[in-house]
Amino acid sequence: MCFSWLAVKKMAKSKQWSHLLPKGSQFIDGKLVSGDGDTHEVIYPATGEAFGTVHWAHDDEIAQAIDAAQKGYEIWRNTPLAERADILRETARLLREQNREIAELETLDTGKALQETLVVDIISGAQCLEYFAAQGAVQSGEQVSFSGEAGDWGYTRREPLGICVGIGAWNYPLQIACWKSAPALACGNAFIFKPAELTPYSALRLAQAYRDAGLPDGVFQVLQGDGAVGAKLVAHRQVAKVSLTGETATGTKILKSAADTIKNVTLELGGKSPLIIFEDADLDEAVGGAMLANFYSTGQVCSNATRVFVHEAIKDKFINKLVERTVALKIGDPMDEETQVGPLASAQHFKKVTAYLDDAPKQGKLLCGGEVPRIEGFEGGYWVRPMIVEVEDDRVPIAREEVFGPLLTLLTFSDEDDVVNRANATGYGLAAGIYTNDLTRAHRVIARLQAGTCWINAYNLTPIELPFGGYKQSGIGRENGKQAMDAYSQIKSVYVAMGPRVRTY
């Protein structure tokens, strides 16, 4: 038998990472399951080559997962709070212990630079587990005394919802799986997670960590699949809650489907967020914030501030520094820890983003970037260089539509009221940020911005302690913070009579 050099090269690349891949497609009832549903290749975005395959869940596997979740839920809901907390903390420890290995797997799945996945994706997931372990251990209701001689009183109980479903996005696969499952488990629910089709693997590693930490079988499970699998989970009558991170159009479909069975829903959707840079801002900090808000994860972050409003008094200085630092970004091998910009996530997404990049110079003044670079050894990957375009009209497509790629749209302003109105002139409301050294103005402007997650003199920092979510078409509900515990629990009120009642009939 004779192999071409290209075939041998591809086989070698595949074998290089094979030790990272979980030995199964689904995680059902405490076990990895190979599955026999439709086969789906998993592509490394840096090369465009398949490095693994998964089977999408079929109806029998969905039914098995629901049955296992119901059984696991009955055990988990009655597990002492302190024991639940111990299991979440141990899961976090295991993730930290396996950080590099899972980070490399996350880079293979997403194409994101290892520089990022090593310090953000898995670590933030572990922090989430630790935070909700603490929150879950101190869950309590309140006691209320009523007036009257009998001394009647009442109390509230916080109880789990039952079986919850999470549907993830492909940009932060493991982090999103933790953001959704940790508060759900802390409240005593069972959880079924469907990863995005492009990024199936790290959720399976999370499932193994939960199991190894002592989580009962069936309490956390993973089912692979496309929108059809997600739709079946959303519509299932035994599912009490659905949480999605994804596009606004997908959120609309889920909301309609969940209405049929009156499910609880949390939606974290798209955005077209503004970043306002006033004339008194620290210029270097503001430039760094604008880059973080547009080019981190190759621009594939829902909260990104892709509309950067710069005060006309500092525009030229800001542009000079921004362009200089942007063209210096290192783009290349995602597994090289010096790399700052990796490829886009898929061929389909590459086609969408490059369509915007190709058209962008017609909508404004091209300041830098936008080319498709040739990177030796990664010629088949989905590469683009970060692009900056200055526009004069807020109504052009790149200033209105979510590109979800490394395209920074630069606009100028001179008046505070004007820029706030322009910043709010969007159907989205996920995030917003401002840079200024005027403390009064900072809080005044933030109070007027129609966005659920805001920053002052920073951007895209999302500590677990603060709730995260959007206004308007950017979603419903909040993830993280104490508010997430409300999203995965329900309150029962109990009235306690301490003596005989007066007969009224």
Image (cartoon, grey):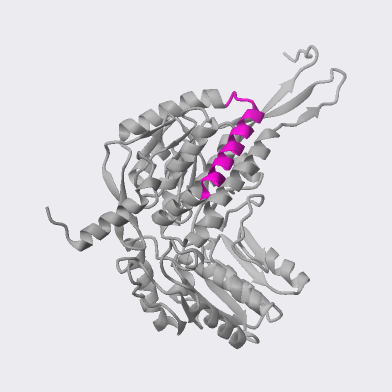
- Judge whether 165 appears above or below 199 on screen: above
Quadrant position of residue 192:
top left
Q: Quadrant of the C terminus?
A: top right
Is residue 196 rendered to the left or right of residue 449?
left
Give how far across and how far down residue 342 sits, in percent: 43, 66
Q: Residue furthest left?
A: 1
Residue at x 48% of width, y 76% of height: 395
Q: Which residues are magenta?
A: 77-99
- Residue 387: percent from left, percent from top: 45, 77
Tell me, yes or no, whether the highlighted magenta stretch contains residue 85.
Answer: yes
Q: Percent position (x, y) of residue 329?
A: 49, 74
* Along the line of sight, the residue nearer the viewer: 64 or 265: 64
Callout count: 0
Residue in the image at 26% along x and 44% along y: 39
Secondary structure mostly taken by the magenta-highlighted segment of the chain = helix
Q: Is residue 218 visible?
A: yes
At 56% from the left edge and 84% from the top edge, which residue is drawn?
319
Is residue 85 rendered to the left or right of residue 377? right
Q: Nearer the viewer, residue 312 or 376?
A: 376
